[in-house]
Image (tube, helix red, strand yellow):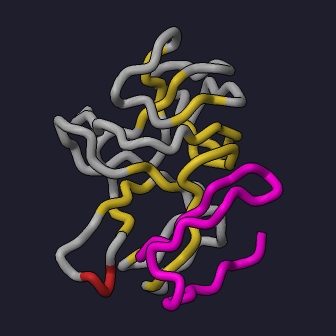
Amino acid sequence: MAEITPVDEQQGMIFPPNAMGQVEQMVYFASGFTQYRPYNVGNTADAATSPAAVAPVANATYSGKICVPQGDTTTTAGWYRAVIQGVCNAAVDGDSTDVGLGDFLEVIAAGTAFIIDHATAPTGSAAAIAREANTGAAATKEIYLLGHQVVIASS
């Protein structure tokens, strides 16, 4: 996939669903990003860099959405599009607990991949649904990102 160029004029913009049904948002990445890694989107005290994507941080209340950048990994700070809802590729870890098709997925604090949340019913942590199984280490898998605010568990 081609690298996505930052476009400052579109700061925070949420784009209509594309042909794949993905909803994307322009999000500020202070240190660039890793392709397919989940990030927490939230507002910062600096309007020039808000909304910003950060590593998931534990919270007890709903706080921000999860986004997944699809562009090539970069270390350049700037504004980039990231999927906030819809079908996309993402890092999914099935090493500790197998992830099956249709399982609900969450991201924990400092997490670099989605893990199983609950196999039968969503919780406040459910950020996505697995569209592919994974029974091993983190790998790129297809998910459906739910697009709502989530609670991020500490572990």
Which residue corresponds to the image point at 66% horizontal and 79% vertical from the top-left?
A: 4
Residues shaded magenta: 1-28
- Is 32 left, or right, of 44 in this rendering? right
- Is 13 left, or right, of 89 in this rendering? left
Which residue corresponds to the image point at 42% horizontal and 75% vertical from the top-left?
A: 29
Is any part of residue 35 visible from this angle?
Answer: no
Q: Nearer the viewer, residue 143 or 43?
A: 43
Which residue corresponds to the image point at 25% horizontal and 50% vertical from the top-left?
A: 57
Q: Position of residue 148 (x, y in %)?
A: 44, 42
| Quadrant in the picture for residue 51 | bottom left
In the rendered image, the quadrant that contains the C terminus is top left
Q: Chief secondary structure of the magenta span?
A: loop
Which residue corresponds to the image point at 35% horizontal and 39% vertical from the top-left?
A: 150
Q: Nearer the viewer, residue 61 or 54?
A: 61
Is any part of residue 153 visible from this angle?
Answer: yes
Q: Position of residue 40 (x, y in %)?
A: 37, 55
> Which residue, as the protein is rendered here, is positioned at the far front?
16
> Which residue, as the protein is rendered here, is positioned at the far top?
120
Q: Nearer the viewer, residue 109 or 151?
A: 151
| Quadrant in the picture for residue 152 | top left
The relative height of residue 115 versus residue 24 in the rendered view (above or below) is above
In the rendered image, the quadrant that contains the N terminus is bottom right
Q: Nearer the viewer, residue 111 or 70?
A: 70
Q: Position of residue 26 (x, y in %)?
A: 52, 72
Determine if the magenta segment contains residue 126. no
The relative height of residue 83 versus residue 106 in the rendered view (above or below) is below
Determine if the magenta segment contains residue 15. yes
> Which residue, as the protein is rendered here, is positioned at the far right?
19
The relative height of residue 17 versus residue 140 in the rendered view (above or below) is below
- The total number of labels drawn is 0
Q: Position of residue 21 (x, y in %)?
A: 74, 49
